[in-house]
Amino acid sequence: MHMPSGEPRTHEDFEVAARAIWRDLPEQFRAVLGDVTVEVADFADAETLKELYIRDPYELLGLYHGVGLPSKSVSDPTSLPDRIFLYRIPILNYAHENREPVRGVIHHVLIHEIGHHFGFSDADMDEIESGS
């Protein structure tokens, strides 16, 4: 898979790119995200794929794991911080197949998963992106 030079490829490169994208988000936006963490993995694990009824691990580019803000309550028991997973190999594959910059795909996936934190569904985000 040929990538333009300077494009993220390694696990570390993806973490650096995700941190840079995160830092570039408006401050008030980041403040509302609270303790959400971003993690990079090569693929989603088998259990996650099974729970989501996904057979092809290349189909899942990212995942928000947590309770969206609209569903949170101060009376909820303490839980692990919400997490956003970026799946490196599917993102690289998608970027290559669609001739898109890897950083652009990382940015899109990260923003999409942040949308889930705010309670948006995939349909909501598709509508927002299409400008409808």
Image (cartoon, rainbow, N blue to C red):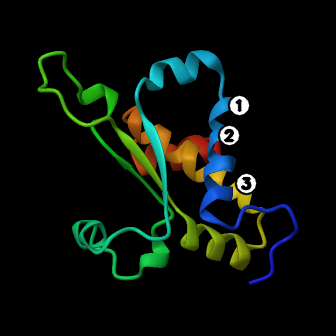
Return the mark for residue 104.
3
The amino acid sitting under disc 3 is Gly
> Residue 16: horizontal and vertical position, in percent?
67, 48
Residue drawn at 63 percent across, 40 percent down = 19
Choose between 128 and 5: the one closer to the eye: 5
Picture quadrant where residue 51 is located: bottom left
User: Which residue is disc 1 drawn over?
Assistant: 24
Q: CA distance from mark 3 to mark 2?
A: 10 Å
The amino acid sitting under disc 1 is Asp
User: Which residue is disc 2 drawn over?
Assistant: 21
Instruction: Check disc 2 and report its element: helix, strand or loop.
Output: helix
Q: Compared to 51, does 24 lie above or below?
A: above
Instruction: Check disc 3 and report its element: helix, strand or loop.
Output: helix
Q: CA distance from mark 1 to mark 3?
A: 13 Å
Choose between 103 and 10: the one closer to the eye: 10
Residue drawn at 59 percent across, 62 percent down = 11
Return the mark for residue 6.
none
Q: Are marks 1 and 3 in contact (CB under 8 Å)?
A: no
Specify few, some or many for label 2: CA neighbours under 10 Å numbering under 14, 14-19, or 20 or more: some
> Residue 79: horizontal and vertical position, in percent?
20, 33
Q: Are marks 2 and 1 in contact (CB under 8 Å)?
A: yes
Image quadrant for the N terminus?
A: bottom right
Q: For the view shown, which residue lies furthest in the right direction?
A: 5
Specify few, some or many for label 3: CA neighbours under 10 Å numbering under 14, 14-19, or 20 or more: few
Image quadrant for the C terminus?
A: top right
Camera-side mark, 1 or 3: 1
Choose between 73 and 44: the one closer to the eye: 44
Instruction: Check disc 1 and report its element: helix, strand or loop.
Output: helix
> Residue 23: horizontal and vertical position, in percent?
67, 31
- Which of pointers 1 and 3 lies earlier in the amino acid sequence? 1
Residue drawn at 28 percent across, 66 percent down = 48
Residue drawn at 33 percent across, 75 percent down = 54
